[in-house]
Each structure stands twice: as structure tokens, then as C-alpha cells.
Amino acid sequence: MPKTKLKIIPLGGLGEIGKNMMVLEYGDDIIVIDAGLMFPEEEMLGIDLVLPDISYLVEKKEKIRGIFITHGHEDHIGALRYLLSQLSAPVYSTKLTNGLIRVKLKEGKVLEGAQLHIIPPGGEVTVASFRVEFYPVCHSIPDAVGLIIHTPVGILVHSGDFKLDYTPVSGEPTDLSRLAQVGAQGVLLLLADSTYAEIPGYTPSEKVVGESLDRIMSEASGRVIVTTFSSLISRIQQVIDAAAKHERRVFIVGRSMTNTVRMALELGYLDAPDGILGRIDEIRGLPQDKIVLVTTGSQGEPTSALVRMANRDHRHVNIQRGDTIILSATPIPGNESLVNRTVDSLFKQGARVIYQKLAHVHVHGHASQEELKLLLTLVKPKFFVPIHGEYRHLSLHGKLAESIGVPKENIFLLEDGNVLELNAQAAKITGKVDSGHVYVDGLSVGDVDGVVLRNRRMLSKDGMVVVIIAVNRQTGKVVGRPDIVTRGFVDTREFQSMIDKSRDLLAKTLDHSGSRPAEWSFINTKVRDTLDKYYDEQTKRRPMILPFMVKV
Ligand SMILES: [Zn+2]
Ligand SMILES: [Zn+2]
């Protein structure tokens, strides 16, 4: 029996939705599974992207033997360009995922020199102490895989994102027979997707969406505008299929959507009859009921084509009476109010808007409870770590594992940064490494304009307040009274006493956070809320508030 233990270290995706990243470390060998980003929440004003903290990997960069990517969604590939700008390691993925990675790396100008390898679903590769097998899974993007990882201490299964759609629109169903086989061989640890662990029963098949699209297109008398994520390639296929049936032409709008569709067509993951796809400038003169537009904006992103169309700010298309708009995605948690605002504005302009609450225009790409139980039953792991989800999802998934007979003490609810060490007999949480959020402001080329404009709008109206909060390096607690610097907000001489009062108010508010170490996201929100309210009361102005933490 080898003495060395295997370390499992999640750097993202556990305790949150997004920025998935898992580190496996055995002796001198490290492999990384997925490198995703998270979309910022609404109040992270001016923040473009949120990435995992990779300082642990940068410290050990000469030990990294490979990066394995399960599928091409942003929350699994989006941080790769930042990761590869700081360290170099071969990247292994399936063909479509590889194509999507190339698009991203090219945008980030790190494609050159990247070592990208294609492994087909069902294929395998050995790097250092790890033999990694790619097994097909069904998800909302073709060419998605889970990983069966043979290590010196035992076999691990990493589910990736998956569901058990027996009639998938593109790609293969999840390979249950292979999972049953390794289950019979004995699996030491299962890491499985928890995103929909709250939802009872089975996730409906993607086919359901095709039926809805078909019906909506046959009923619509005007243009149909479908918004979704550019990575939901199976969804785009269904839009093309429905459009073809109703003799409508399809126009892809927006840079990321166009790039993805072109790449998927070239690689053969999208299939479009000749002449159905048109260039946006060909739209003029076509009858309204012969038009389908596909674009991004399902999340109400201020810079997306849909929002610009809704604000009459788009070069080619404005929303008009008679349009039918389909939001073929559900809001990412945190985006609800943005999405609602967009829907309201579309209704106001006389469009008909169809979203998940009104018709089956979206299905989830993740397994619900009965599917999760089936996976657990087939794999029969000795140890279980739920991944991909907020704490309640992980916790509920843990309960499901218990219900099918995994002993409670063998189920580990890890959070980002936790180190789980295991060998063939035992597993234990032994420590914590740096993890957390890294914010990217304005680096993603396509969004710079929007962010800059949004900030300028705010600054020009009500100015800016910078709050400097000192935090004790050892205890993590807030020290003293925060400092406040303002620009373009109020005359500081005249309002000195108000500024002073707001410092007292902050000191008092932050003190309430009690004896536990200050959590930055909490402080951040608290500071913004407190000052926003106070200044609004005092001055009827709402300056941009920027809290900064200084470790002392
Ligand atoms: Zn996914
Ligand atoms: Zn995901």
C-alpha cells in the first residue's frame, strides 16, 4: 500500500455556483480539473468577471502535469486564459471543448504556446501518477465528459456536469454501463454535480424544448428572437431545426454567439441546411414571419445584444410590436432583477415575451435527485464529495448519498480551499489553502465599453466615495474606524461632519459582525448598503461606493 496520500483540493465551485476548479495532488504530481469563471453578482458594480484564486497552483506550478476540462461551458473553461498566462501545462479535452477553448484563448491572446490535446469521449490519457479516462455524459452542450481517474490510492469518479437524458438532441447519453463497471471494480471517491440536488424526480429531456420552439414558431406572426447562452449548442441546433421546419431564416447576432456557431459548424457539432443561416444585413426586405434571430442576453447583461435591441441601441435590430422573444435559459442566481427589468422593457415595447414560467423553453442540463441517486447507486463509492453547488445543494446531495447507504462519516462537505487527504482506507480534512474570488475589471474585451459607460454614468451623476477598511492580518478582524475619501460627491469642508458621522456609523456596523473574522464579501455589501442609505437620506445622492481592504 502506498504511504503517500492523495489530496483533493477544490479551488472553486464548492459553496457557490460557478468558477469550478478541482486540484488533485499526489506526491510531486498535480492535475487540475476544470478552470471556470463566475459571472459577477449585480452589486459587484464595474466587475466583469470573477475567477478562482490560483495562488496555490502558481506556487506549485512546476508540479502541474495536466489540466483536464470536462466540457465547454464558461464556468469550466472561462478561467483558463488567466491560468495559462501564469503557468503552463498541457490541457486535455474533447474536440468541441477544445474548439471553445481555442476561441477563448485567442481572445485572451494566450493561444500561441498553449499545449492543447484532444481526447475523444471514451478515450484515456496517462499523466504521471494519474490515468484519466473520459466517459461521455449528457449535458446541455455536446462532447461533455465525466472523468474516471485511476490513482495509486484507488479509482476516483468526477461526474463533470451531467444529466441522464436518454433522448439527447446532440451527443451521447451518459455512459451508465461504464460507470456500473467501475462501480463493480470498486470506486474510492465520487465527486458529483450538485447543482440541481434540490429538485425531486428526473430532469426532462432537451427534446421538450424542441416541441415548444416548434409550436411558438408556428404561432408567431412576426419575428422570433431566441436568446440563450452561446455555449448551449444543442439549444441552437433545436432553434435551427424548428426554423427550417417553418421556413424561417436564422440570423445569429453578437460576437460570442457568431464565433461559437461558426466553430461548431466547422467541427460538425451544429447542422444547418444550406442557405438557412443569413448575414444580419440580409434581414432587410425579408417578411417578418420568415425571420428568427438568435442572440445572447438571456441574463439581461447590459451589454448584450438583446438589451441593446430593447434600448433601441442596436445597429441592425430594434424590438418592435409583433416580435416574439424567447428567453431560453433561466436567470443565474443573482441576475433575476436584471432579467426582470429586461422582460418588462420588452413587454412595454409591444413584444410578446416567453420565458420558463410561461412555457417549456428551457430545461436544465443537470441531474435531479433521482438521477443523482442512480449515479451513486451505480458507482457505489467508499467516499463521497458533492461538488458544483452552494452549501445547501452540497448538503442535500450528501443526504441523498446517505439515503442510498453511503456511511455519513464517509461523506465530506468541502468548501473551496479545504484539503481532503485520502488513501484506500481513510479520508480526512487536513487543512485549508488560499481560495476565494479574484475580480477582473474590464479585461474582457467585449464588455469594456459597457462597464466603463456604466461607471461613468454613476460617477458623473453623484461622484465617488472610497472607503478604506483596515483588517488585522492575523485575526482577520476589522481594526479602528474606516477612512473615507470622496471625489465629486459633496464639498468636503461643508459636509465634514456628515462624512465623520458616516465613519462612526460604519465602525459601529462592522463591529456588529461579532467575534468571527470578517468576511470580505459581507463587509463589502454591508459598507455599500450602509453608506448608500445614509448618504441618500442626507444628500439625496447615490455616489459610487468603493470599499477597499488593507491588511495591517
Ligand atoms: Zn455545464
Ligand atoms: Zn457547470
Image (cartoon, rainbow, N blue to C red):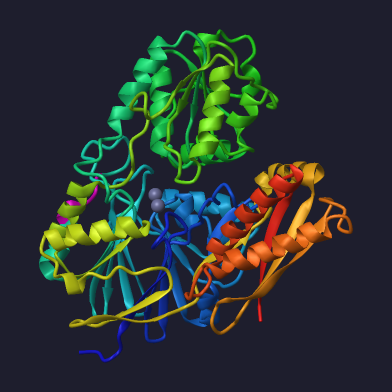
Is 175 colored magenta in this rendering? yes
From the top left corner, tell me how far across and down residue 32 is, in percent. Answer: 42, 69
Q: Quadrant of the N terminus?
A: bottom left
Horizontally, is 541 left or right of 4 in the view? right
From the top left corner, tell me how far across and down residue 403 is, in percent. Answer: 12, 59
* Residue drawn at (30%, 50%) of the image: 162
Q: Nearer the viewer, residue 467 or 119?
A: 467
Residue 261 seen from this side: no
Horizontally, is 184 left or right of 263 in the view? left
Residue 460 seen from this side: yes
* Residue drawn at (33%, 54%) of the image: 145
Q: Main secondary structure of the magenta part?
A: loop
* Residue 500 position by quadrant: bottom right
Tally of marks: 0
* Residue 404 position by quadrant: bottom left
The answer to whether residue 62 is above or below residue 361 is: below
From the top left corner, tell me how far across and down residue 357 is, in percent. Answer: 37, 28
* Residue drawn at (26%, 45%) of the image: 199
* Residue drawn at (28%, 28%) of the image: 208
* Residue 344 position by quadrant: top right
Q: Quadrant of the C terminus?
A: bottom right
Q: Nearer the viewer, residue 457 or 486?
A: 486
The answer to whether residue 124 is above or below residue 177 is: below
Q: Nearer the viewer, residue 248 or 94?
A: 248
Is 151 colored magenta in this rendering? no
From the top left corner, tell me how far across and down residue 448 is, in percent. Answer: 70, 47
The residue segment tinted magenta is 173-177
